[in-house]
Each structure stands twice: as structure tokens, then as C-alpha cells.
Image (cartoon, rainbow, N blue to C red):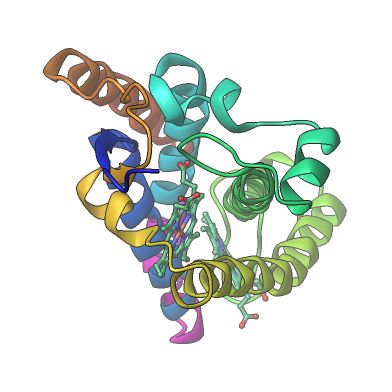
Amino acid sequence: MSDTAFKVRVWDLPTRLFHWTLAALVTGSFVSVKLGNMVWHGRLGYAVLALLLFRLVWGFAGGGYSRFSAFVRGPGSVMAYLRGASHGPGHNPLGALSVLAMLAALLFQASSGLFTNDDIAFEGPLSHRVSGALASLLTTWHRLNENILIALVVVHVAAIVYYRLRLKQDLIGPMLTGDALLSRPYPGSPDNLAMRLRALAIATVCAALVAWIIAL
Ligand code: HEM
Ligand code: HEM
């Protein structure tokens, strides 16, 4: 076997920007709530919501390995992967489950936040639209989901470190530069100007949608 490596564009720029902005904003919403700055907690949460909506649309309207159809696999593929089956570029079948779990838990967190009420001075913009009982239920779930989010992010980062140290596979580099060095010349994800403009248009609509929701 030759050890030639082929440089393949795995993560398009929109997906990479999505990832690092998401990590920064989620960290910011944790820090702000712990510091008691609810105004910034809310703002960062709205931005997270817009980002998540973008990623959901990008999973269908994006290209290459960012599409859900490229990485969402059934239990059979996950078991095969655990038994050592190889997989193409992008999220592996098990990692895909953690990606979906993080997206779902964050979507719940950011959208339940809209209905929260801290019983002191701050309430989410849609809190007055639902009954007091529902608002406090969603606030309780919003608080409980903190533990799930922390667990998911810890497992996520631990998995990346495990890949680096044990499996000698660098996953962070491709999430930064877009490119991975692979053993075969797999087709790359389209990451040209047209795709990036498409992502910008989608992100703008998602941001406008969130702005509209919070103004309701
Ligand atoms: C609050 C913190 C974080 C959150 C919520 C988060 C969330 C996510 C999500 C949703 C994805 C899927 C990307 C996509 O397909 O759109 C992902 C992938 C990834 N994340 Fe994070 N992330 C966080 C922190 C980090 C950190 C600190 C690192 C670096 C150590 C990291 C490294 C990666 C890498 C390398 C991938 C790609 C994994 C693969 O190749 O399958 N993440 N992350
Ligand atoms: C990524 C999005 C979000 C994350 C990760 C997040 C995280 C958290 C966490 C961890 C807590 C519990 C803090 C503690 O008890 O120490 C909390 C509480 C709270 N969050 Fe969020 N949040 C998000 C979005 C939002 C949004 C969009 C709003 C409203 C606009 C909001 C409003 C609140 C309120 C009012 C509380 C206090 C509830 C109480 O009285 O205990 N959050 N959030």
C-alpha cells in the first residue's frame, strides 16, 4: 500500500464558521447566565437559535459532507462502525449521533429560553404568550437541560481528544482549514463562492426569522 495522502475539502466554510461561532456563543450563554447578566444571556441565546436554524437548513441545502444525508445513518451502520468498518469522510456514524443529539438539545435550550421566566426581573420574549404554568415548566426544563448539554459537550470534546491521542486522527484541523488528508481521492465538498453566498442568504433569513419571533 502506498501512503500517499489526498487533500480533500471535507468541511465547507459555512459549516466551519457555524461550528466555531456556535461553540463560542454557547460558552458565552453559559458564562453570562452564571454572571447573572440575563440581557446578554438572552441575546447570545437568540444568536444560537439563528445558527441552529441555519444548520438545519444547511443540512438539506448545503453540499457534500455537511448534508444530513451524508452522515445520518441507521443503527446497522453504527454497529458496523463499532465493529471496525471503515467509513468515508465527514462525521462517522457514531459521531453523527452525538452531532444530532447536540443540535437537538441546543435547539430545545434556545427555544425553551424564549418562554422562560426567572421570577425576578427577566422573562423570555414569548413568556407572556403562554400560561404561567407552561412558562414555569419550560423554565424548569431549560434549567435541567443544562446537565444534558454539559454532558454532551464533555463527551464531544473527549471524543475529539481520544481520536487525536489514541487513534492518531486529527479532526480539529479539518474543522479549521476545511481539508483532511485521506488515503483515497474522495470527492470534496463544494465550497465555492456560489455555495458561500447561498449560505449567507440562508443565514440572513434565519437571523431575520429569529428577530421577528422575539419581536412578537
Ligand atoms: C460548546 C462547545 C461545542 C459545541 C456546542 C460543539 C458542537 C458541535 C457540532 C454541532 C458539530 C457538528 C458540526 C456540523 O456538522 O455542523 C461539531 C463538530 C466538531 N467539533 Fe464541536 N462543539 C463544541 C466545542 C468543540 C471544541 C472545543 C472542539 C475542539 C476541541 C470541537 C471540535 C469539533 C470537531 C473536530 C468536529 C468535527 C468532528 C468530526 O470530524 O466528525 N468542538 N461540534
Ligand atoms: C444556547 C442557548 C441557551 C443556553 C445554553 C442557556 C443556558 C442556561 C442555563 C445553563 C441556565 C441555568 C443557570 C443556572 O441555574 O445557574 C439558564 C437559565 C435561564 N435562561 Fe437560558 N440558555 C439559553 C438560551 C436562553 C434564552 C434564549 C433565554 C431567553 C431569552 C434564556 C433565559 C433564561 C432564564 C430566564 C434563565 C433563568 C431561569 C431561572 O430562573 O432559573 N436562556 N439558561
Q: Quadrant of ligand 2?
A: bottom right
Position of 34 relative to 91 (above/below): below
**Taking 190 as reference, is 45 left or right?**
right
Q: Residue at x 31, y 25 (%)?
A: 188
Residue drawn at the location 25% of the way across and 43% of the way down: 179
> Does residue 209 appear in the picture of this structure?
no
Residue toward you, 70 or 54: 70
In-image side of 179 versus 152 (left or right): left
Classify residue 137 by image quadrant. Answer: bottom right
x 28%, y 34%: residue: 8
Determine the main secondary structure of the stretch shown in magenta.
helix
Tell me, yes or no, if residue 38 can be seen here: yes
Which image quadrant for residue 207?
Answer: top left
Q: Quadrant of the N terminus?
A: top left
Give percent across and percent down for residue 126. Answer: 61, 43
Residue furthest left as drawn: 193
Membership of 98 in magenta stretch: no
Q: Is residue 177 left or right of residue 46?
A: left
Residue 87 in which image quadrant: top right
Residue 130 or residue 53, whichever sits in front: 53
Counting labels gives 0
Residue at 46 percent of width and 37 percent of height: 89
Percent x, y of residue 86: 61, 41
Which residue of the protein is positioned furthest toward the front in this rendering? 1
Q: Which residues are magenta?
A: 32-45
Residue 33 belongs to magenta span: yes
Please tell me which residue lies in front, 7 or 153. 7
Location of residue 51 in the rendering, given as x and y in whole percent from the top left corner:
41, 41
* Residue 77 spot, x, y in % from top left: 76, 35
